[in-house]
Amino acid sequence: MSGGPALSVILPTDAFSTIEPVIRRLRAQSVVEKLELVIVTPRPAAVEQEAANTDGFGAIVVVEVDGLVPLTAARAAGIRAATAPVVFLGETHTYPEEGWAEALIDAHANDWAAVVPGFGNANPSGVLSWAGFLIDYGPWLSSLEPQELSQIPTYNTAYRRAALLDLGPRLDLLLTSGDELIVNLRAAGGRFVFEPSARINHVNVARPSAWVLERYLSGMLTANSRMERWSWARRLLYVLGSPLIPVVILSRVAGGVAAAHRAYSLPLAVFPALVMGAGVSAVGELVGYLGGPVAWADKRMTEYEINRLRYLGA
């Protein structure tokens, strides 16, 4: 393809079949020939064999890693192996809609370090699905207006690859669900924008036991990522202020919740579920600041990230 790919999609996975639904959506993009598919896996031989039958993409690259835990390192390996100027940190459970790739590529024609797409709920039938979705992606709901952003989600965002590579070896540690990547990109002068015309649908954990654990693990891992640069005094301050964490979470997502309620007439049960989810995440953060079992949390969260479709119902 003349000029090389314009957008590399980074997809860590345990098997080709896990990402097949995502690949079908990517192949349906109007600019599929400008896309580079970067598959990161501990089983490269099997993935390469199945990927060989996948046509339409500008390029397909399979990157071997020892394992998917930590997932941050696997994603960083994919970014380093990519060749396009823009990389999208995809997931096994996010499905782009028509025009998604073209909108991201066009938005990156301007000098943005990151472009955030507009999110929709891929499994909107359950209260827990809506609550988890709004806590994680409510501020970037597809029905909201384009705007410059101060906060972005680490995953399912398109980045200027050079901005990420400039972070050097720290990149492996910064690709967490916390705000460390944002802090570092902003410190380097990076700016972020929301482009809702690049629509993508996100599948959410909905099985009650898994939903509670995912909320808890998310809080714990967020705390752990922040503590890399924090003094003990600041950590203690956040421990003491942990009762306020649910308020911070809910205030951050309030705009998206209001927009979702207008667009979808959310069930009333979503609102107490949001409060519960914020509370569980706050407990996870508190445990994280106190030195909770991060290795276990990382392994369990990776299972939810890679095999999300196993946790959609009771």
Image (cartoon, rainbow, N blue to C red):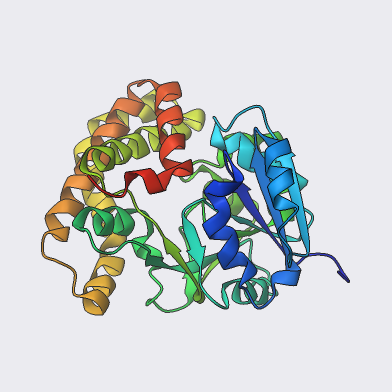
Q: Is residue 279 left or right of residue 46?
A: left
Q: How many marks?
A: 0
Residue nearest the viewer, comparing 141 with 183: 141
Res 298 visible: yes
Which quarter of the rendering shows the C terminus?
A: top left
Quarter of the image where one finds residue 215: top left
Figure check: 100 above or below 158: below
Residue nearest the viewer, comparing 123 with 239: 123
Residue depicted at 37% across the width and 25% down the height? 233
Residue depicted at 29% across the width and 68% down the height? 255
Res 168 visible: no
Residue depicted at 67% across the width and 47% down the height? 39
Residue depicted at 58% across the width and 78% down the height? 99
Which quarter of the rendering shows the N terminus?
A: bottom right
User: Residue 301's x, y, as percent?
Assistant: 41, 35
User: Residue 193's x, y, as percent?
Assistant: 54, 69
User: Residue 279's x, y, as percent?
Assistant: 20, 42
Residue nearest the viewer, comparing 173 with 269: 269
Residue nearest the viewer, comparing 220 with 232: 220
Figure check: 94 above or below 170: below
Quarter of the image where one finds residue 86: bottom right
Q: Is residue 258 left or right of residue 220?
A: left
Figure check: 28 above or below 269: below
User: Residue 174's x, y, as percent?
Assistant: 57, 39
Outermost residue to the right: 2
Quarter of the image where one finds residue 83: bottom right
